[in-house]
Amino acid sequence: MNIPEGILCTKTHEWILEEGKTAKIGLTDYAVEQLGDVVFIELPEVDNSFSKDEVFATIESVKAASEIYMPVSGKVTAVNEELINSPELINEDAFQNWLIQIEPDNFKEDSEGLMEYSDYKEEVQ
């Protein structure tokens, strides 16, 4: 699994990667491992806006259903359609198979308190 450089993680197991004026958001490898085989993902529509820590999606696996929270506030600019049709792809690579792309309202301010991946991995062990 290739972990992108500069990725930040939340205590609720989401990751975010800033890419210029947009950012991709997904679930961490740890979260995907804990869920087991993913069978369904519900993602928001493009142009929907969410506040930091607001639920923006749900994911279901053979083990459990979970809510997914926004790491920073912003407006959805893209949704990973492949995951809606083939949710099991997230089990193959949690970082390659992002959930949504957003235009953050204020990335610098909202991302304070998020962890670098190495710190996140230490916390979940």
Image: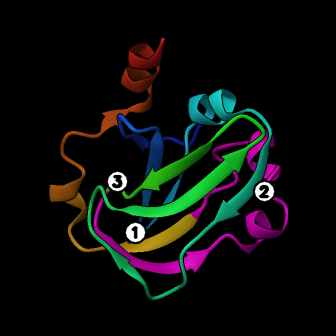
Question: Residues in magenta?
Answer: 72-99
In-front residue for pair 105/53: 53
Residue 54 placement, left or right of 4: left
Q: How many marks?
A: 3
| Spatial separation of the CA atoms under disc 2 and disc 3 | 21 Å
Comes first in the chain, label 3 or label 1: 1
Q: Position of residue 8 (x, y in %)?
A: 39, 42
Residue 108 placement, left or right of 14: left
| Spatial separation of the CA atoms under disc 3 and disc 1 | 17 Å
| Spatial separation of the CA atoms under disc 2 and disc 1 | 27 Å
Residue in view at x 58 percent, y 28 percent:
30
Comes first in the chain, label 2 or label 1: 1
- Residue 2, compared with residue 51, is above or below; it is above
Other-residue count near label 3 (Cα within 10 Å), few / some / many at <14 / 14–19 / ≥20 = many
Comes first in the chain, label 2 or label 3: 3
Query: Which of labels 2 and 1 is toward the front?
Result: 2
Specify the label residue 71 is tagged with: 3
Specify the label residue 20 is tagged with: 1
Is 96 part of what is drawn in magenta? Answer: yes
Image quadrant where residue 94 sits: top right
Other-residue count near label 1 (Cα within 10 Å), few / some / many at <14 / 14–19 / ≥20 = few
Residue in view at x 44 percent, y 72 percent:
102
Q: Which residue is mark 2?
A: 87
